[in-house]
Image: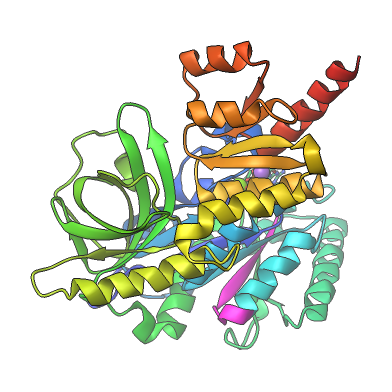
Amino acid sequence: YVKLDSSLRSPVCCVLGHVDAGKTSILDRIRRSRVAAGEAGGITQQIAATLVSIEDIAAETVSINRSHNFTLKIPGILVIDTPGHESFSNLRTRGSTLCDVAILVVDIHSGLQMQTIESIKLLQSKRAPFVIALNKVDRVYGWKSVTNSPFKDSLKVQTEEVVQEFEKKMEAVIAELAMQQVNAVPYYKNKDFRKCPAIVPTSAVTGEGIPDLLLLLPLLSQKFLGDRITKRDTVECNVLEVKVQDGVGSTLDVLLLNGSLNRGDKVMLCTLNGAITTKIQTILESSNMKSTSGVQRIEGAIGARLICKGAEKTLAGTELHVIGPKTNEVELKKKARRDIDSVTNFCNRPVDHVEAELETATSYLSSGSNGGVHVQASSLGSLEALLDFLKVSDIPVGSIGIGDPNKKDVMKSSNGYKCMLLFDVHISNPLRKIAEDSGVTIIAADVIYHLCDEFRQLMRTRQM
Ligand code: GTP
Ligand code: NA
Ligand code: MG
């Protein structure tokens, strides 16, 4: 069923939905990985892109495609997982901006929840075609699971009561979706995929309905995306995450949509300190990030990790530009500037002031002379999420920092609450010692809400 059309790139498919609806688990099924099981606290806190090849999709859909006879023409699907936790609306927005198609995951037993509705709004404003994975059908009372089977085959072996129970639950979700102006229809009854988003009942645990989902995504893409997924030579590359990797330094997880990147390419990055030019030292394919040598060249659409000198203050959500012999760098710099300003609109100020502005914004939150806590996170994206979370948790913030803390950060923390909340950053032992000597407590965690729990615990013990 595969007949590749070399003019097409892989569509980008974003997975959205409420926390714990099963987004990562569905992706694990699709890409045959086990990411969900290894996540800190079982929640996704970053966005990442992985390519699912058309060969794998063809293999998974052989049996269901016998009746459809659908020819697969795209080279694959580039899937982007997003967090469902409320703190990460910035990452959901970023994911939804980049996607061509989407999977909205709804837990059939919980129906529409806060972030399901937020996700629907994002998709509606973006006008992206999407399918609804109605997940966790294996938990319908009395359900008999048929591992990895197309949904209709699975439904056939259920008793009449179970079918009724399932349909009752699905109807309830359909009614809730209608209230959000989404006219969802089970995909096997759907006559108009453009007007009516299709519902695919799934189980990420048993694999039921996954073949259906895997066939529908290429179908929607090939039918409705057309021009959008026609390959272009101009480089289009977006920075998803900026991280510090042990022994390597700062790395950029990027989504290369169109064009190609080569090792040694001169590039312009949008950073907290303005636009900078640097070189691509190493390109790691997202399927093989453990490798240290990397590859010479990648072509879109693909996800990859780049190592570039001086990239640590790159702003996630901005574009990476390749500088060729004919590039007008002055023009490019202006473009980068606009990009930086739009990403840092957190405080609606030019980026030179953003650090200072963040300080003002956060100290404004803090309770007068008490100062609040010092907060430090690995990237601006995670810092924003963390600040939002602290705000709703009523934890006052006195000062902030991005990246691994230094001595100055520790000194700042010795005011006010004498406490540093560290998210996803590393603090050296000598610095720990300095903190200890200044009476500063360090709370480090890789799950945002654990920081808050531990902070409350600290306040309780201090009162005793
Ligand atoms: P966030 O990234 O934190 O928003 O969550 P998520 O939507 O990625 O959900 P995740 O994949 O982490 O799954 C949450 C929990 O639900 C895990 O314990 C999964 O094992 C479980 N789960 C996911 N899908 C299914 C399913 O189809 N059936 C059952 N029974 N459990 C599921
Ligand atoms: Na989860
Ligand atoms: Mg997840």
- State whether residue 53 appears in this view: no
Relative to 66, residue 255 above or below: above
Outermost residue on the right side: it is 464
Question: Residue drawn at (64%, 29%), measured in percent from left and top?
Answer: 413
- State whether residue 420 appears in this view: yes
Question: Residue drawn at (54%, 40%), measured in percent from left and top?
Answer: 401
The picture quadrant where one finds residue 223 is bottom left
Name the foreground residue: 255 vs 61.
255
Residue 232, image x, y percentages = 24, 77
Relative to 41, residue 135 above or below: below
The picture quadrant where one finds residue 438 is top right
Check if residue 128 falls in the magenta segment.
Answer: yes
Relative to 4, residue 139 above or below: above
Q: In this view, does 42 lie to the left or right of 395?
A: left
Residue 242, image x, y percentages = 42, 47
Name the foreground residue: 233 vs 387.
387
Question: Residue drawn at (62%, 87%), measured in percent from left and top?
Answer: 191
Residue 303, image x, y percentages = 35, 55
Residue 289, image x, y percentages = 32, 39
Q: What is the quadrant of the C terminus in the image?
A: top right
The picture quadrant where one finds residue 416 is top right
Q: Is residue 167 left or right of residue 137?
A: right
Relative to 411, residue 206 above or below: below
Check if residue 183 falls in the magenta segment.
Answer: no
Please state the quadrant of the image where ligand 1 appears: top right
Question: Residue drawn at (75%, 34%), measured in percent from left and top?
Answer: 452
Name the foreground residue: 68 vs 44.
44
**Magenta stretch in the rendered image:** 125-135
Q: Is residue 7 left or right of residue 118?
A: left
Outermost residue on the left side: it is 325
